[in-house]
Amino acid sequence: MTDSTQLNYMIVDGVLGDFVQEIAAYIDKLDPPADEKSSFENYTTGLMESESEDDQARTFLAVAEKSAVLANAPEKEFESAYNLVLHILTFSPNLTEVLPVVLKNLTSSSKAEPLQVLSVLANLFNILPTNSPLRYNVFTSILSFADQTKNIHLLISQLKQLPQWLNDWGVDEANKKDVYYRVSEILASADSEESHKYLLKAVSTLKAGSDESTILSKKLVITYLVAEAVYDFDDIFALEAVQGLQTSEKDVFKLLEIVSNGDYASYKSFTKSSVDSITEEQWIVLEKKVKVLALGSVVYKASQNARTISYKDIAQAIDVSDDEIEEWVIDTIRAGLVEGRLSQNDQEFDIHRASPVGQFGVEQWSTILNRLDTWKASLKDVLDVVRSARENAQRENVGKFRHNNVTA
């Protein structure tokens, strides 16, 4: 597949009749007829000689149906033979009807090499106009076949263009949701981070209130909660469907708030049985995440008034023993929430940087505005000092100039 915004063409010299005769003869070679009269070449030649639109349509359909025989082609000829079939079918005014036949033949064969099939599908995708809705059908076939043959890793780099493709093809929100969710499910075992992104995209197409919205939003929230590398939940809080969980799945939404805010005290008192879709192993991951976020939160709050935080305050915030503190601080640094230096002698963590934990709201904006005001005042003081120094220097230069003139 390509990201080109221009039309892409397969270069094949000749006229349609010659193409049909060539592929028909090749199909007869792979699947010999009982006699010449019953040959596929003879059949298509008769149809092509007719000026009837119905016969022309029968030709395209016959070529599409007979493409199944190409599964018997030698490996080195398979792709070029199918490319010729695809080129022939681009002349059909009823491509919408014949294309599914070819897609089925391509993806249902057990004889062809999967990588060759994917290559042919990619060629078909690329020769279709970029805004053709038929690209949607080809893409879903590529997706399913890549999943079926364990080759989804080959598509991951191309999937970043999927949102634009779906817009180009005029796909409605319901089908966008289906595609994003399908991609998310397929990627779950190959690339969990990408899988999470597409699940989020699927939920972003939904409004709050429906059963489907509740089910997928709950799945998204729990997926993000138990994902080891996810510590920022602003993207899912921003979704209307997720906000709808406040009424449809109150306990799930409450858990999301507790975890995202690093509220370890509330987490300890949370009734785990109220969210039965989280396993025991996932609760262990989740508890570690809450502690990391709680540690990040207490360090951030300390950084507003000081450059250090004591080991004692850290231990108190996440309920751990003194000999565990440094390990937890290192985990929090790895999570990207804080930066600093551990001081065993002083039993302190020197804070170099700390990120706010939880939803970025009024309190965080207020903190930023206060800091900007402080910086503005500091810069004004610096500017005043520079201006004063410059004026003094100018006065000194004028004094020297006058003194020199008087002396002269």
Image (cartoon, helix red, strand yellow):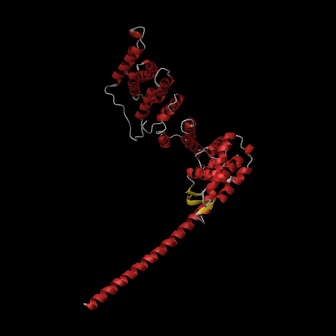
Question: In this view, which residue lies farthest toward the top?
Answer: 35
**Front-lying residue, 288 or 164:** 288
Considering the image in quadrants, where does the N terminus appear? Answer: top left
Considering the image in quadrants, where does the C terminus appear? Answer: bottom left
Image: 74 above or below 317: above
Q: Position of residue 254 (x, y in %)?
A: 69, 50
Count of numbered circles on the image: 0
| Left or right position of 126 against 326 | left
The residue shown at (43%, 38%) is: 130
Question: In this view, which residue lies farthest toward the bottom?
Answer: 406
Residue 363 visible: no
The residue shown at (67%, 54%) is: 322
Q: Position of residue 75 (x, y in %)?
A: 41, 21
Residue 132 visible: yes
Q: Quadrant of residue 211?
A: top right
| Left or right position of 194 against 90 | right
Q: Position of residue 363 (x, y in %)?
A: 62, 62
**Front-lying residue, 280 or 93:** 280
Q: Quadrant of residue 60?
A: top left
Question: In this view, which residue lies farthest toward the front?
Answer: 345
Q: Position of residue 329 (x, y in %)?
A: 60, 53
**Front-lying residue, 162 or 230:** 230
| Left or right position of 46 against 99 | left
**Front-lying residue, 314 or 53:** 314
Q: Quadrant of residue 84?
A: top left
Image: 200 above or below 356: above
